[in-house]
Amino acid sequence: MIISCPMMTSLYSVRMRASSHDQHLSGAERIVPVHAVAETTAALIERALSAPLGPPDKIHCNSEQIDPVTVQFAKLPDVHSYQVANVQEGRLAATQFLIEAGLSADCAALAVATLAEGAGPGGIVMRGAVLMDAVTGERLEHDPARGVRVSRMDILSTFRPDVEALLVAAGLGHHRVIEALVLSGKVLQAPGVVAELCWSDAPDYVTGYVAAPQCGYQRISQLKAAGDKRGGRVFFVDRSKVTVSALVDYLERQPVLFDAAGTIAPLKKWELEDA
Ligand code: PML
């Protein structure tokens, strides 16, 4: 359940995007109280400058005040982690999880193939996510190179140390896990979202996930080969529940803060379930 809290002090959305020759290199964002804006901006710029893909030629850092009464509070998804033997098995697991979330086998396979081949025009990696009709598999994002950029979400700053400690204790301390969990948590709160499929476009990070409102955040140890630069996100939408413009507006503009954690299950070997 999401509730708004009218009691909060002044909050800012702080967002960083770094690029080189107009190619996206890194991005990150936080929602912090006014007194932490300068420190957060410095940390995000430092992060952009030390990105593994080399120094950016452009860093955009932007801070925008958020009206506290518009903030929605929510609980992070439960986390499950599955060990697979190789990429093929990982993609089979992802397909099965997507079907369990309510997609047809064709739509699930189409989404996996879309990320595997590079979802943007000419096979390039998109800057944001694919929006896919959960019934027909139709692509719905207006700009196929940009896609949909989920923004304005974070863990409540006073609660962040607790979540970080929980993830570290579970062996999930990599910054990509907490960032993906927060992003996915917001996606799963969005009206009409049936599921999300993601794996990283970072060549050295092969873990990905399928998330769905009733199943939580299901990590899969390998969804691509090491060295592969292709990756991204697909959000599946039930268009009988929401319009594309209302969903995109929610994903890009609605501030969401997480003030409770879900459960974290121990790593488990994935096994194909009988149909
Ligand atoms: C995880 O290990 O749970 C994160 C997987 C997805 C990472 C996506 C990204 O690189 O942004």
Image (cartoon, rainbow, N blue to C red):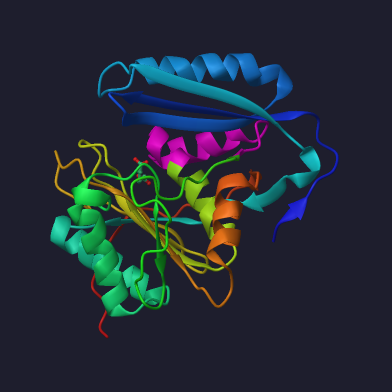
Residue under the image location 35 percent in, 75 percent down? 99
Viewed as shown, does residue 189 lie left or right of 7? left
Task: Determine whether 214 is above or below 40 in the image.
Answer: below
Viewed as shown, does residue 248 lie left or right of 96? right
Q: Quadrant of the N terminus?
A: bottom right
Ligand number 1: quarter of image: top left
Q: Find residue 40 and report its horizontal and vertical position in percent.
A: 57, 20
Q: Residue furthest right?
A: 7
Total marks placed: 0
164 part of magenta stretch: yes
Residue 36, picture quadrant: top right
- For the record, the magenta segment spans 154-179
148 part of magenta stretch: no
Viewed as shown, does residue 174 lie left or right of 68? left
Would residue 179 be visible to someone looking at this image? yes
Q: Quadrant of the C terminus?
A: bottom left
* Front position in the image: 119 or 30: 119
Residue under the image location 41 percent in, 41 percent down? 177
Q: Residue furthest bottom?
A: 275
Viewed as shown, does residue 57 lie left or right of 84? right
Residue 20, picture quadrant: top left
Q: Residue furthest front?
A: 142
Q: Find residue 23 and report its horizontal and vertical position in percent.
A: 29, 30
Q: Find residue 13 and report its horizontal and vertical position in percent.
A: 63, 31
